[in-house]
């Protein structure tokens, strides 16, 4: 998730080992080949065989509209050791869509097809090329056509966020639409959207008729949600979650941007409020604080 799930967050969230794979934030591809250091910036895991410390493979997520540059960059990522490539056709951001990236491409299934095909051809066969789409841009009329285009291009699997771009993040996610699409394709389909608990996961699996699910915001709101779903683990306590906050902050502390850690903690805290009553108080306590040290002090004093 762009601007949220960076390498340090991936470390925290995959620690239990229940995710089959994680995905980087999207790397924007325009009209040139990105350097090795740019890939490493988004995915330092490349220096460790493309895996988090817990061993979870981290796929490199690319977002772009030019099939040739997408292919070139996917190939470079693969050569750098990426265990998988993930292509983004779901991003709803205006600036991205205005430059023909993300969900706007769902209005052109043939362009989607061509990008996926070129990337598939540019990447060694044993490296998965996964694709993510929404149900459409303004409406769902091209949902099946896009899924067929992605399958015909040779994608390894297709994750579907069960909403259109126009529907944004407004609940509900239309899981039954994924089942509808699934009837037309044979590639593995992964259901995504509004999974915040084990119960949601079970309902999503039933309604979408998918064996596999993808978790986004739910994994931030309950950091061991994947273990809760897959291994019936107990949800992390607030204290355990605070320890993750500290570890995350320490891992990102050396970044040049001094506001980054406080801002990221505040952002994460807003997701945690959905799961933990204590997060509400914590959020209020740190709202106006800009120094890393002060936030750590509050966590240490009040919550650990
Ligand atoms: C802040 C934010 C950043 C996101 N970044 C990405 C991204 O880089 N790539 C992507 O495919 N989806 C991205 N998404 C969408 C999520 O992956 C997911 O499809 C969506 O949030 C619905 O699933 P959820 O209800 O489990 O969160 C992002 C969502 C949010 C809220």
Image (cartoon, rainbow, N blue to C red):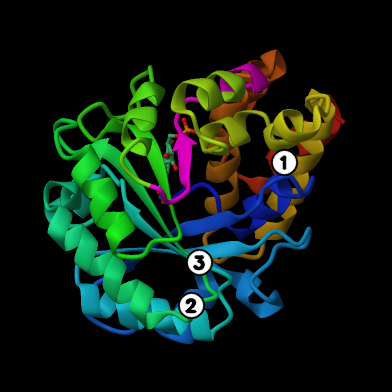
Residue in the image at 72% along x and 48% along y: 12
Q: Nearer the viewer, mark 3 or mark 1?
A: 3
Label located before the other in sequence (2 or 1): 2
Label located before the other in sequence (3 or 1): 3
Residue in the image at 66% along x and 47% along y: 292
* Marks 3 and 1, how far apart at CA: 32 Å
Residue bearing the label numbered 3: 128
SS at mark 3 in the image: loop
Residue 191's x, y, as percent? 47, 36
The quadrant holding residue 51 is bottom right
Residue 245 is labelled as 1
Figure check: 139 above or below 2: above
Q: Would residue 104 be found to the left or right of residue 78 on screen?
A: left
* Marks 2 and 1, how far apart at CA: 38 Å
Figure check: 222 above or below 13: above
The stretch in magenta equals 186-200
Write down which quadrant ligand 1 falls in.
top left
Task: Count neighbours of disc 2 (C-alpha within 10 A) and say few if under 14, some if 14 to 19, many if 20 or more.
Answer: few
**Hey, which residue is sitting farthest top in the picture?**
277
Where, quadrant-wise, is the C terminus in this rendering? top right
């Amino acid at each position: 998730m762009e601007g949220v799930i960076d390498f340090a967050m991936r470390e925290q969230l995959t620690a239990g080992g229940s995710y089959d794979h994680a995905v980087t934030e999207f790397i924007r591809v325009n009209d040139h080949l990105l350097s090795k250091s740019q890939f490493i910036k988004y995915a330092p895991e490349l220096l460790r065989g493309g895996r988090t410390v817990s061993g979870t493979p981290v796929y490199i997520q690319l977002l772009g509209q030019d099939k040739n540059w997408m292919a070139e960059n996917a190939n470079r990522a693969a050569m750098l050791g990426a265990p998988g490539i993930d292509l983004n056709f779901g991003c709803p951001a205006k600036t991205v869509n205005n430059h023909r990236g993300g969900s706007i491409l769902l209005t052109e299934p043939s362009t989607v097809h061509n990008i996926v095909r070129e990337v598939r051809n540019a990447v060694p066969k044993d490296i998965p090329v996964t694709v993510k789409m929404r149900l459409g841009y303004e409406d769902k009329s091209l949902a099946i056509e896009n899924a067929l285009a992605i399958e015909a291009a040779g994608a390894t699997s297709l994750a579907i966020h069960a909403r259109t771009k126009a529907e944004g993040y407004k609940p509900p996610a239309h899981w039954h639409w994924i089942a509808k699409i699934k009837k037309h394709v044979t590639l593995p389909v992964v259901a995504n959207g509004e999974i915040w608990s084990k119960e949601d996961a079970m309902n999503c699996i039933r309604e979408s008729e998918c064996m596999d699910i993808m978790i986004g915001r739910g994994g931030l709101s309950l950091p061991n949600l994947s273990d809760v779903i897959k291994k019936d683990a107990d949800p992390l306590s607030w204290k355990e979650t605070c320890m993750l906050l500290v570890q995350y902050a320490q891992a990102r502390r050396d970044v040049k941007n001094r506001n980054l850690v406080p801002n990221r903690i505040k952002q994460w805290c807003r997701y945690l409020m959905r799961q933990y009553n204590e997060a509400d108080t914590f959020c209020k306590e740190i709202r106006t604080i800009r120094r890393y040290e002060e936030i750590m002090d509050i966590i240490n004093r009040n919550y650990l």
